[in-house]
Amino acid sequence: MTGQPAVIALDEQSTRSVTTEQWAQLAKNVLVAEGIGQGCELNLTFVDIDEMASLNVEHMEGTGPTDVLSFPLDDSADVVFADQPRLLGDVLICPEVVAKQAPDNPDEEMALMVVHGVLHILGMDHQEPDEEREMKAAEQRHLAAWRAA
């Protein structure tokens, strides 16, 4: 696939200032670097702490808010209807939690959360030691490219 995928970024919170275009571009860069091109779509949504806590409890059996949640869709290229994008899934990020995790460098932490969330959409995980090493290496590659841009 050539070209760039579409990333729809929405800021549905008002606690922290978020430059959606910047983070949408980073998500696109990760997708392209991982071989995902035109004809695919990803949603990137910034949510408030209460929404993130609710989603974490409901979908992950977690407690309280978390920094990032990814919800990949089981939408393979074989199932795409003519002229419709392949829907990759949703990445949700809570800027308030991200800022608390790295008060001295919230942009670096936000970049990590975007990259981390997109890699989960693409099927990467960190449950097993080998998977964790692979995912951390991919995160570092993408963050290095982001820093160099």
Image (cartoon, rainbow, N blue to C red):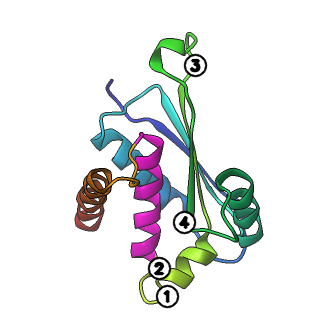
Q: Amino acid at mark 3?
A: Gln
Report x, y in % for residue 73.
57, 33
Report x, y in % for residue 88.
52, 34
Compute the Cα span from label 1 to label 4: 17 Å
Query: Mark 1 and 2 residues: CB-CB less than 8 Å, in contact?
Result: yes
Please identify the residue farthest to the front as the structure is shown.
Answer: 128
Q: Look at discs 1 and 3 and give the one toward the viewer.
A: 1
Q: Look at discs 4 and 3 and give the one toward the viewer.
A: 3
Residue 14 falls within the magenta-colored stretch: no
For image coordinates 64% across by 54% down, the residue present is 60
Q: Amino acid at mark 4?
A: Thr
Magenta span covers which residues?
107-123
Q: Which sits earlier in the primary sequence, circle 4 or circle 3?
A: 4
Which structural element holds mark 3? loop
Whether residue 17 is visible here, answered yes or no, is no
Residue highlighted by disc 2: 106
Residue highlighted by disc 3: 84
Which structural element holds mark 4? loop
Which structural element holds mark 2? helix
Q: Is residue 102 left or right of residue 1?
A: right
Residue highlighted by disc 1: 103
Quarter of the image with the N terminus is top left
The disc placed on residue 19 is: 4
Where 64 sits versus 39, above or below? below
Compute the Cα span from label 2 to label 3: 36 Å
Near mark 4 (Cα within 10 A), the count class, few <14, some 14-19 or many ≥20, is: few
Which structural element holds mark 1? loop
Q: Look at discs 1 and 4 and give the one toward the viewer.
A: 1
Whether residue 41 is visible here, answered yes or no, is yes
